[in-house]
Image (tube, rainbow, N blue to C red):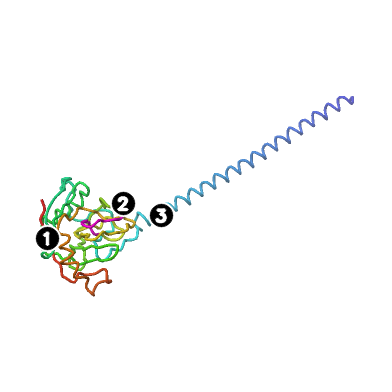
């Protein structure tokens, strides 16, 4: 066999070896790329599972059966669920208009205006309490006199701040964004952190009050005192706070105070 044929054969065998080598390299590279891709997919799947588990746990403890029950304050209504409880008057009964009436605390007669347009649900509830006679005979159990707030709170079931567990509603309406409640404001009391714990209790601001909002917001303003505020301060507030109060600025009024009359139209 001639040298040229041997050279051609060796060259051909070399080319064949190179092809086989390249083919093996391509297979190896494909295997590495596939393993890398599989690892990435597996990592993403694990991450998704972890995220879903975390979200499920958060929902369980914030919006599901594991949600903690809010603790009501001692001077407002109580309702942990964001839903009305009891026979709450429909907001439409406020007729989205201004109602005028009288509210007497002992012998102090206050002229009031209730705003059914700004707070239809709160106004409807208050109007219902007046119309049903619920407020008559109820006491004003709490007086607050401080540099940042002056108010008297009324309407508890037991004369000591007790709420009616069969009657509570929300949401908060017509709450001032700046937390300032001018003198004469009539607003609804509620539990701390619970916008659906409003009930029969309300408070009258006799000296500009700064009431900070909590996680639920501020307080529903249902109307204003339009006359008699000076008599309220002179006859009830001026007597001071009982020594049995929680502090020198917050407690039962020295002068026992009862709602003796309530009318509205």
Residue 58: which disc?
3
Q: Quadrant of the N terminus?
A: top right
Q: Can residue 118 be found in the magenta stretch? A: no
Mark 3 or mark 1: which is in front?
1
Residue 197: give x, y in percent of width and height. 25, 58
Residue 109: which disc?
1
Mark 3 or mark 2: which is in front?
2
Are there few (<14), some (14-19), or many (20+) residues within 10 Å of tag 3?
Answer: some
Q: Are marks 3 and 1 in contact (CB under 8 Å)?
A: no
Residue 78: give x, y in percent of width and height. 25, 61
Q: CA distance from mark 3 to mark 2?
A: 30 Å
* Residue at x 31% of width, y 51% of height: 177
Q: Which residues are magenta?
A: 177-189
Query: Which of 1 and 239 lies nearest the eye of the viewer?
Result: 239
Residue 225: give x, y in percent of width and height. 17, 56
Are there few (<14), some (14-19), or many (20+) residues within 10 Å of tag 1?
Answer: some
Residue 177: which disc?
2
């Amino acid at each position: 066999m001639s040298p040229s044929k041997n050279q051609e054969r060796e060259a051909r065998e070399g080319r064949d070896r190179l092809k086989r080598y390249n083919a093996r390299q391509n297979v190896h590279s494909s295997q590495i790329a596939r393993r890398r891709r599989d690892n990435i997919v597996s990592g993403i799947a694990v991450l998704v599972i972890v995220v879903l588990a975390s979200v499920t746990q958060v929902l369980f403890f914030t919006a599901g059966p594991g949600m903690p029950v809010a603790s009501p304050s001692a001077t407002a209504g109580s309702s942990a669920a964001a839903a009305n409880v009891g026979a709450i008057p429909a907001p439409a009964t406020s007729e989205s208009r201004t109602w005028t009436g009288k509210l007497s605390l002992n012998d102090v007669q206050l002229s009031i205006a209730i705003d059914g347009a700004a707070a239809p649900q709160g106004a409807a509830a208050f109007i219902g309490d007046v119309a049903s006679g619920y407020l008559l005979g109820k006491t004003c159990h709490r007086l607050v006199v401080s540099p940042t707030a002056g108010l008297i709170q009324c309407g508890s079931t037991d004369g000591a701040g007790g709420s009616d567990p069969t009657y509570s509603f929300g949401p908060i309406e017509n709450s001032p964004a700046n937390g300032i409640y001018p003198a004469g404001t009539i607003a609804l009391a509620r539990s701390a952190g619970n916008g659906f714990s409003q009930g029969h209790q309300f408070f009258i601001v006799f000296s500009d009050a700064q009431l900070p909002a909590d996680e639920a917001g501020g307080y529903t303003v249902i109307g204003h005192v339009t006359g008699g505020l000076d008599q309220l301060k002179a006859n009830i507030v001026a007597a001071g706070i009982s020594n049995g109060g929680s502090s020198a600025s917050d407690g039962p009024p020295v002068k026992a105070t009862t709602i003796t009359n309530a009318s509205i139209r």
